[in-house]
Image (cartoon, rainbow, N blue to C red):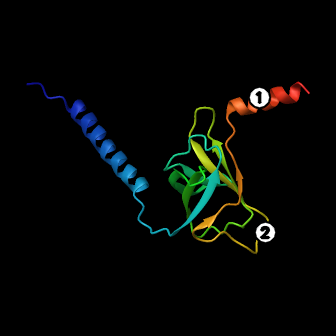
């Protein structure tokens, strides 16, 4: 039987790399710190494919996650999200549905308001909501503006 030390060394290296990659995966995906969150809701006419688990971003930085999506009694798309309680959002902040490129995930984008005296509290509600605009909606607006 032929002994091939090179294959043994390469196999050992691949095995150690796989174990290291798995441990790094666990480290990134398992949160050890207890982040307290606030539940905030918003009503949309058009949601554009936002689902549970999508990100909530403030100026491009993830500050929360969508926790529930359902129709309320008036047939609005109600989105409930959990946002880091350290983030204090002014009462006149605006939330909108954005897309990460043409085929990318949807996420909720928050633009903070300028009123720094009143904040959205836990179980609060966004008053300023901008609905999702699909590519078809945007093209129709451009065509409408071009014909005037």
C-alpha gap between disc 1 and disc 2:
35 Å
| Residue 115 marker | 2
Instruction: State the residue in front, 39 or 34.
Output: 39
Q: Which residue is mark 1?
A: 140
x then y, percent, for residue 74: 60, 53
Which image quarter is the C terminus in? Answer: top right
Quick check: can you spot residue 100?
yes
x then y, percent, for residue 84: 56, 65
Quadrant in the rendering for residue 38: bottom right
> What is the residue that sits farthest to the front in this orientation?
73
Q: Which secondary structure, mark 2?
A: loop
Tell me if label 1 and label 2 are in contact, CB under 8 Å.
no
Position of residue 37 in the picture relative to residue 125 (left or right): left
Instruction: State the residue in front, 44 or 135.
Output: 44
Which residue is at a point 49% across and 50% down the rendered structure image?
Answer: 53
> Looking at the image, is 4 positioned above or below residue 39?
above
Which residue is at a point 64% across and 50% down the rendered structure image?
Answer: 44
> Looking at the image, is 57 positioned above or below residue 4?
below
> Looking at the image, is 17 positioned above or below residue 123?
above
Position of residue 115 in the picture relative to residue 3 (left or right): right
Q: Which secondary structure, mark 1?
A: helix
x then y, percent, for residue 121: 62, 71
x then y, percent, for residue 127: 70, 60
How many numbered circles are shown?
2
């Amino acid at each position: 039987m032929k002994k091939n030390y090179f294959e043994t060394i390469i196999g050992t290296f691949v095995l150690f790399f796989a174990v290291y990659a798995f441990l790094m995966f666990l480290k990134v995906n398992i949160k050890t710190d207890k982040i307290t969150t606030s539940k905030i809701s918003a009503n949309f006419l058009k949601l554009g494919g936002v689902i549970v688990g999508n990100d909530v971003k403030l100026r491009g930085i993830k500050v929360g996650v969508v926790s529930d999506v359902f129709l309320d009694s008036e047939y609005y798309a109600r989105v409930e999200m959990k946002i880091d309680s350290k983030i204090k959002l002014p009462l006149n902040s605006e939330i909108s549905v954005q897309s990460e490129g043409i085929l990318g995930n949807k996420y909720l984008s928050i633009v903070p308001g300028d009123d720094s005296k009143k904040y959205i509290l836990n179980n609060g509600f966004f008053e300023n909501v901008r609905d999702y605009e699909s590519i078809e909606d945007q093209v129709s607006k451009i065509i409408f503006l071009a014909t005037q």
